[in-house]
Image (cartoon, grey):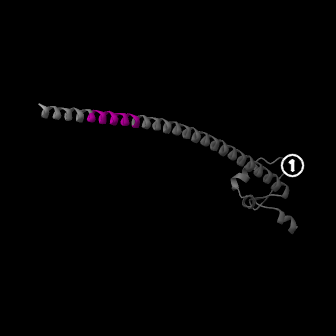
Amino acid sequence: MKDETKELKTLKELADELGVSKQAVRKHFDKLPPTLVPTKENGKYLLSLEIQNFISSKVSTFDTTKVSTVDTLVDTLKDELISEKNSQITDLRKQNNDLRKLLDQQQQLQFKTQQMLEEKTLLLDTARKRKWWNFLKK
């Protein structure tokens, strides 16, 4: 008789053992098939080993499905984030290349402007020198 009561557990004890809430165990307890009937003592249900196994299988199946669903969602979100990140990297590279081209064009224009300025300065200097020499010759 003592061994038989050792096998019996309350809803709370089973919930603690499985690491789930009492409500989760109660949810599966309410859906017990008619062949599994719990005993009630002092206002508490005592669950036989068969009932414990039944509820344990339901809880672990539920947890496995839940974990699998969460893993799938995490993988999906991770893939979406990686795709978005890759798209942003591609856009930034294109923008970087465009800015490099613009900078190169600006530097070329600056160089040509500097060359033209130097040529005009040289022409002005030679024109002034000629005038000065011409002035002395007269």
Q: Is residue 100 left or right of residue 122?
A: right
Q: What is the x, y in percent for residue 89?
A: 55, 41
Question: Which residue is painted at 13% across and 34% down in the image?
Answer: 136
**Residue at point 75%, 51% (across, down):** 59
Q: Residue 86, relative to residue 48: is it above or below?
A: above
Q: Which residue is mark 1?
A: 35
Q: Would residue 72 be visible to someone looking at this image?
A: yes
Q: Farthest residue in the front direction? A: 137
Crowding around mark 1 (Cα neighbors within 10 Å: few <14, some 14 to 19, many 20+) is few
Q: Using the rendered view, name the quadrant where residue 99 is placed.
A: top left
Magenta stretch: give its range: 107-122
Look at the image and tell me in which quarter the N terminus lies. Answer: bottom right
Majority secondary structure in the magenta region: helix
Query: In the rendering, at what x and y percent does residue 57 appear?
Result: 80, 51
Tell me if residue 114 is in the magenta stretch: yes
- Across and down, in percent, residue 110 comes to 36, 36
Q: Residue flagged by tag 1: what amino acid is it?
A: Thr
Percent across and percent down for residue 120 are: 28, 33
Residue drawn 23% across the image and 36% down it: 125
Magenta span contains residue 133: no
Q: Nearer the viewer, residue 25 or 95?
A: 95
Question: Could you say which is closer to the camera, residue 42 or residue 95?
Answer: 95
Q: Nearer the viewer, residue 15 or 35?
A: 15
- Can residue 29 be seen here? no
**Left-right relation of 86 to 109:** right
Q: Nearer the viewer, residue 67 or 103?
A: 103
